[in-house]
Image (tube, rainbow, N blue to C red):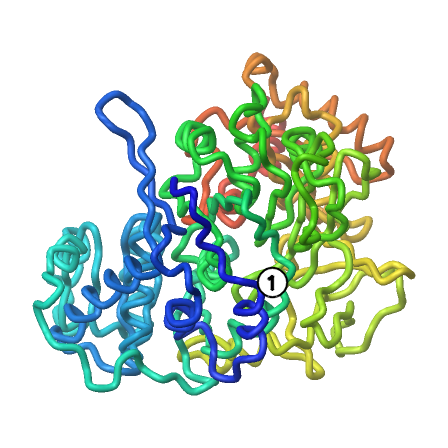
Amino acid sequence: MSDASPVAPLGVRQQFMSEPDLGAGNFLQYALEANPNRHVPFLYSHSTDHRGEVVLRGHSLVDVAALRDRYARWYWANGVRPGEPVAVIVAEGLEPLIHFLALSALGAIPAMVNDAMRPDIMVGYLNFVGVVGVVADDTTRLASAYRADPQRRPRFLALAAEVQAAGAGSAELPEQYPYEHSPDEVVALIHSSGTTGTPKSTMLAHRQFWDGKQPRMVRFPCEPYDRLMCLMPHTHAGGLSYFLTATLLGLPTIAMADWRRAVVEPVMEAFRPTMVASFPRSFVELATGEAPVKGAARVHSWFNTGDSAHYGHIRKLVRLGERPAGLIKPWLVPQDAAMEAAVPGSQFIDGLGSTEMGMALFGGVTTPETPRHDRSVGKPSEVVIKAACLDDDGEEVPDGQVGLLAVITPSRTPGYWNNPRLTSSFELAGYWLTGDVARKDGEGNFYHLDRTVDVIDTVAGPVYSLLLEEVLLADCGDVVRDCTVIGVPGPAGEGQCPMAVVQLQADAEDWTGEMVREKANKELATAGLATLAAVKVARTPQDYPLGPTGKVLKRELRTTFATLFAREQDAATHA
């Protein structure tokens, strides 16, 4: 890596905060024109050579802009025009980011699709969006699907390799380039994880997706020693959000192409990040087994978003690395905080957010010294005008009571693509419903208890699956590597019952589900929580289904175990 710093001077970053036309559709152009270090590599990709060694390749702002322009020429030559949605289905890493930039620079709308999405679901999603074209690493299955339904076939199905092979001067660019977005124009479509059903298509708008991120220009750690490892999918709003931030800051960042520990750890050792941003999936892997001491030696901050992480995993990660003695708030390292004054351990910023929220709007901070506070996601960020827990009529519930988590913020999505009815279903009394249930304490701290669709309706009252998962992972962590708790129909007349599907630690593979249940229920009873009616051990990946972003597909597990107690009751009857 280059010894020269690519970081934008503080004055440049401060100017970005007040630029009226800057947004998600043109941030690269602003960085390119304003950062005097535009020729210094800041964005890194990785590969492995013939000896199995990690190879890092750096790209400057100038390099990234040249790639953007080359891809944009190909899209323009193939008839892509402003306002048209185009599907991008390429492997994670640098590539989806370049396609996003190229399409945005033309005023088109990149529909970013995780390439792990199931093919049949993908085709249905693309048809719903109405994409005019598709660029993918592999078009075989899509081509086959469209042969069966040729009327729905987009104007082009192109291999990503074809775009990559296009010459720098292979075609003209439009006279107006890069495109000038109005504040409300849609700049991307991001699909949901599908954990609660068919993926939704969330719109990101030019100004909306930048709103709330302005303070990061002076608060996000950006010292000469800082390095960001981004493990988030870059087809997701989380990955795009960190990329936007890193580009404007000029922060050295590696865009990972894989989130699994076997790939991540060697790259960590080569890149030596001071910050790691991820969904919980990677943190589960890094917190399991032998600690990645060498790779995490310089980490001072772990950033989580999307689903909240679990304390059982967080507590293992914050024991790693070192942090400046002056590290006092999330997103803030004082300008004079030198790593020479480091203290052992790191901080974990657990940000509750979603594509619809536009960014993480809540952030709980855990350090080695922090007492345990299950499910606390802290206070809302300053971009939130108001956050509340509401009842079904839109009235705020008293502190301590559980309600629907709702926010009023300019960072929220304009809505769902081609689906105003779905959009309106998430709006209540001027708030945006996040799809979560939560409670607020008297000090203004929020506690994330569950997704609304995952609350378990037992005869004794609602049971919140995330609270049970916390206990399994924190208090049964010697046995349970990862877990998910769902509600399934109990025996006749008993309503729903909570059950868990667990992955075991490597040295606990001989444990049965009943053994885990007995241990877990002792801890749950001690915590004053509902106990589990059943525990099933996931022995194969099929037993623990994950969506394209690595989230557990609870809806599939609910279907799998929908008749569990009916089968057991029937077996007992005929025994």
Q: Quadrant of residue 404?
A: bottom right
Name above or below for residue 264 compared with residue 132.
above
Q: Which quarter shows the N terminus?
A: top left
Left/right placement of residue 321 relative to residue 99 reads right
Mark 1: secondary structure? helix
The residue wearing badge 1 is 216
Residue 562 seen in this snapshot:
no
Q: Position of residue 288 (x, y in %)?
A: 57, 26
- Count neighbours of disc 1 (C-alpha within 10 A) and say few if under 14, some if 14 to 19, many if 20 or more: some
The amino acid sitting under disc 1 is Arg
Residue occupying image coordinates x 43% and y 70%:
34
Q: Position of residue 371 (x, y in %)?
A: 84, 38
Left/right placement of residue 310 relative to residue 67 reads right
Name above or below for residue 412 compared with residue 240.
below
Left/right placement of residue 434 relative to residue 388 reads left
Nearer the observer, 37 or 360: 37
